[in-house]
Image: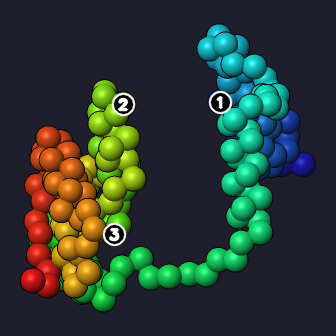
Amino acid sequence: MQNWPAPIGGSFSNESPTVNHLILAVILLLILVGIARISSRKLGRSKKRAYVPGWWNDAQNNQLTTVTNASFSTQSIMNKGEYSVFALTEKFVKAHLPGHRVFAQTSLGEILKSPDRNAFLAINSKRVDILIVNPFGVGILAIEYQGDGHYQQNAPMRDAVKKEALRKAGIPTVEGGVT
């Protein structure tokens, strides 16, 4: 049997390096699980979460029942006008801003935070049509496409809320589209 180089800390066996690596991986996994359990107890979390009757579980069960009984199909994430602007933005960013990325229909709740819970809830479900992020994943420019059906119902108020939150976070907004 061939003697393989000993792993760090000594030799486990004369098995192949793959077996030694597997043994090390299992040991590390067990250590990490132990640390996670200790940390969980220190934070006051129980090992298993029991079913707690109440509105939260009832709401979740109702959502699951509703979704289970419904049908779904795919749809486009953007209309044609938005997609045209998105494609042009992608080309520009790829050519001129290495490491930057372009995202579509991004929730403000994913890119902004506020210590004021009510302010956060006001923007959480609102989306920007197109978002350019820097190489660290932080938004640097929001693009809003105002299409044919944009100015319906409370769109001006929604836009004002989005623009103000983005402005306060230091993310400029560019608007354009059909007039």
Pointer 3 residue = 104
- The mark that comes first in sequence, 2 or 3, is 3
Cα separation between marks 2 and 3: 25 Å
Cα separation between marks 3 and 1: 47 Å
- Looking at the image, what colour scheme do you see? rainbow
Residue 33 falls left or right of residue 99:
right
Residue contact at pointers 1 and 2, CB within 8 angstroms: no
The secondary element bearing badge 1 is classed as loop
Pointer 1 residue = 8
Q: Residue at x 56, y 81 (%)?
A: 74
Q: Disc 3 marks which amino acid?
A: Ala
Indicate whether 86 appears above or below 33: below
Q: Residue at x 37, y 47 (%)?
A: 124
Which of the labelled discs sits on residue 83, or is there none?
Answer: none
Pointer 2 residue = 117
Q: Disc 1 marks which amino acid?
A: Ile
Q: Nearer the viewer, residue 146 or 102?
A: 146
Residue 150 falls left or right of residue 12:
left
Indicate whether 4 appears above or below 173: above
- The percent coordinates of residue 14 (x first, y second) are 85, 40
Q: Nearer the viewer, residue 107 or 155?
A: 155
Q: Residue at x 41, y 77 (%)?
A: 77
| Quadrant in the rendering for residue 38 | top right
Cα separation between marks 1 and 2: 50 Å
Indicate whether 105 appears above or below 177: above
